[in-house]
Amino acid sequence: MAARMRAPGLTRAGLFTLLGVLFAAVLVTLVRLGYGFSNPFDGADGWDEKFQNAVLTVGLIASPLFFLVGLGAFDYWFYWASGRPTRAEDHSSHGASSWKDYFRVNTDHKVIGIQYVCTSFFFMLIGGLLAMLVRAELAAPGSQFVDPNAYNGLFSVHASLMIFLFIIPVFAGLANYVLPLMIGAPDMAFPRLNALSFWMLPLGGIMMTASFLAPGGSFSTGWTAYAPLSTEVPIGQLFFTIGVQFAGASSIATALNFLVTIITMRAPGMSFWRMPLLVWANFSTSLLVVIATPFVAASQFFVLLDYALGFNFFEASKAGDVLMYQHVFWFYSHPAVYIMMLPGFGIVSEILSVKARKPIFGYRMMAFSLLAIVLLGFTVWAHHMFVSGMQSWIRIPMMVTTAIIAVPTGIKIFSWLATLWRGVLHVDTPMLFVLGFLTMFSLGGISGVMLAMVPLTIHVSDTYFIVAHIHYVLFGGSLFTIYAGVYFWFPKMTGRMYDETLGKLHFWLTFVGFNLTFGPMHLIGVQGMPRRVADYPEQFAGWNLFISLASFMLGLSTLIFVYNMVSSWRGGARADANPWRSLTLEWQVSSPPPVFNFDHVPTVVGGPYEYGVPGAVHGIFRPAGEEALPEAEPQAVPAGEPGREE
Amino acid sequence: MRDGDSGRSHLLPLLAIGAIATACGIALGLLIDWFPTAASEESGPIDTLWDVLLIVSVPIFVLTQTFVLYSVWRFRMRPGEELEDGPPIHGNTRLEVIWTAIPAIILVALCSYAYVVLRDIETAEASEMKVRVVGEQFTWTFYYPGDGGKEVASNQLYLPTNTQVRFDVQSKDVLHDFWVPAFRLKIDAVPGITTRFRVKPDKAGVFPVVCAELCGLGHSVMRQSAHVVAPGVFDKWLADLRAKGRPGGEQPGGEEATGEEAGGAAPDGKALFTSVQPSCGSCHTLSDASSTGSIGPNLDETLKGKDAAYIQAGIEDPGAEVTKGFQDGIMPNNYGDTLQPEEIKALTDYLVEVATK
């Protein structure tokens, strides 16, 4: 037992977490004594509320760090710093032989990828459950199941989990698994950092979920946590403020890892213009994350300092600036929309090309439009603030840039449509979700252009029209691509096939349930129903009941997905190495891939999507025993785009 | 690769289906009754902008979706084609230029049009009436110009028709958003600064005033009414307000107390409980008034054994003593200003009668 306590792992991590709480209590007591505050046990109820909140605040910051130390995430550096012999990573821990291996620190990108995907789907189910409670409360006007405080908590935690613990990390997880395989690399550039990135994620998620247990209830200011409301509500707010820091740090570290991996670890012959578009998409996303995510961290640090230490950043009577919060927050949170969408664009390109059996139409424009979105994405943030009271002239340039960002997005949509044209369409589950994405995301994009128009937004901002728009973009857009990607790479990740019938059933129930749920929200929003209200006037009762019933159907459809994934992973038919006849590298190795991905380093000799080109290959594998490649690349397909119809 | 299929033969049926679907889509979009009642001059251009956006958007959506469905219908893999590939088309520069340029032109045109609309609805007229709107958790107070440069406060928003009004919007605590859906206009109330918008109401009636920015527990009950009345009625209402020096509040029993003084009868406490704005019942549970609000303490329980002085203090200065389990600053502290002393007394007497025993 003692040995188990000392060895890195979850047991030691749990012990260290308790130590972290103890550390917080001691630190707070000492500081309070130093400042001459009263004895914490002198409070009216035998317990001083300020003392309790201070311990909670410091504990929220300290115990996750203690947890990571206990888990062994920093052992290598501690050994190195103290001059003791470091244990070089010999990759002996790679791979997972049983489900228990997924609960240990592992530096194998394939194990981490699955850890990421499963963790984020776990939080997605919690977030979905919260959404069901929200809809149950909204099924009729008045107060039925929850009081207003609990209601505000439900939608706040729902949005925060879905954004920070599901969509952003699940894309990072999928890419973690397939991206090194796609570029012919044995692993990510920084495997230990990769493991650390993953383990920060559940910390943030548990913190946000556990906020319901906080005194005064969970954080209740929406995922936007607008100041000064967020600096005045009960202590549950800090579970968001601090939880976001861990999710954000995880996100930044992974993005750096992706950037270095993509830049330095591509297989020989894989130029930037031979990279699959999923790699391009994650390259662009990682740029966004690295530049933008520090801003959300800053905005939440401001709130933390205001809340805990009275810094008055947002206290108007003390020369604070309330609008500054929104500018800093949206400078991250608008690019975050693209962080949540670009990887999905990559998934769509991969699947569409394979399932239509055609090259991606306009490959270079697809890559350039990603970069254009990255650039333009930083110039539109204040369109979230058209009615915030900021200087009115800012609205005009922001309206124009917001509208113009639809151009690169339109290029992508039209190119995907052109890829369908005259293809041989294999309409199976991943393809259905991609086609569903094309439909729903177009609608979300169009309502986005409408929202760029300032006079209209003055009326519909903060209404259900916004709720409808964001769900068409993030559910109909991002989540559909996530489902598509999970089905598409399920055989590669698990070595099993999913159940096609259940997959199609899942798609149709989701597609219909989604539209019945979120479609009518456009209408009630324009008619005047504000968002984030627990109660609403009688005139909206009919539509809200309809929406709630539809949303329960949508919720139930998720269970089909979960059942399909679990049962297929346990006992599905064995998958071939390349069931989709894809050209990209990840499908050229066994399913699941060997522990070190490639027994021989592949050489890339052509584009990734040369379907229909006779004899085309993307990568070749050096035959065993043959050390040197011939100087001239064998039967190289020219890097240009040979089939262009000018 | 499939052969004998040049692609051009598909264009005609595709366009025909697309045109029919587009026409249906636009018709449907314009038939739906999207907006609430319009009660301002600004509503017209905004509602027209919406129609224009629909007419431009629907064809784009419908045509892309027709394309998807047509492709699935015609190019779906048939039995025997399992190992076939499509033609290796890598791109078409002319097409790519077209679908970059045309959307860009449409978007710039829409932005220009929206800019014109924005200028149109935000132009100040030479004479405008000022109303200062102050938001706090969870109520709005409206300040009208009074005699001798002093303002008079009201918890009722009255506006004359066909006069441009400028709202100077402020907040005492957190962010709120002053929205009148019938006017199509809103602006955040931001602590520390004054935000504003102008509106010219052109239709008499009672329209909801909604807080559109999450402001805490009582956000969903932060709703009041805008009474748009004929200028003569408005002038009389304002004169009465100035004469009293403080606002009349909602007259008990009468939702439509537009200007007429309700005689000298003592106010009815039970009616006041549900008619003051925001109403007591929207936050407090009180079985006698059959209210079920849960934002504030349950009065049936917390007022047991309390006296009139405690209740009156609680109405006028809710922060003085906060019931355990509830936060300070949630209940509006402007009732002392916006209610008449006799109204507060009536409320207190009523609560003493029904809740303290």
Image (cartoon, coloured by chain):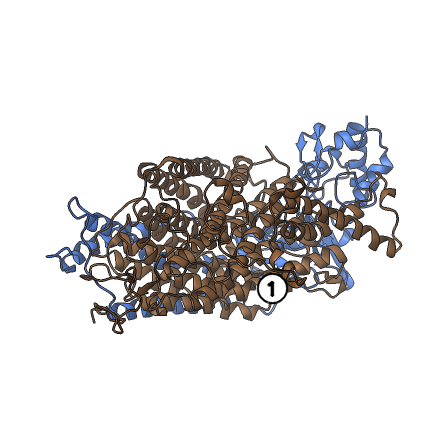
Provide the residue designation for mark 1: A328
Is residue B84 shown above or below A332? above
The amino acid type of the residue labelled 1 equals Val
- Along the line of sight, the residue nearer the viewer: A436 or A343: A343
From the image, which quarter does the N terminus of chain B lie in?
bottom left
From the image, which quarter does the C terminus of chain B lie in?
top right
Task: Give the image location of residue A548, x and y in percent.
Answer: 48, 37
- Along the line of sight, the residue nearer the viewer: B333 or B84: B84
Task: Give the image location of residue A282, x and y in percent.
Answer: 43, 61
Residue A530 seen from this side: no
Q: Quadrant of residue B175?
A: bottom right
Pointer 1: residues within 10 angstroms few (<14), some, or many (20+)? many
Is residue A618 shown above or below B232? below
- Along the line of sight, the residue nearer the viewer: A553 or A195: A195
Q: Is residue A144 left or right of residue B136?
A: left
Q: Quadrant of residue A615?
A: bottom left
Task: Give the image location of residue B269, x and y in percent.
Answer: 75, 34
How many marks are shown on the rendered structure?
A: 1
Q: In the rendering, what colour is chain B?
A: blue
Chain letter belonging to callout 1: A
- Along the line of sight, the residue nearer the viewer: B315 or B330: B330
Q: Is residue B25 left or right of residue A231?
A: left
Is residue A430 shown above or below A382? above
Task: Give the image location of residue A82, x and y in percent.
Answer: 68, 62
Q: In the rendering, what colour is chain A?
A: brown
Residue B294 seen from this side: yes
Badge 1 element: helix
Residue in view at x 35 percent, y 40 percent: A498
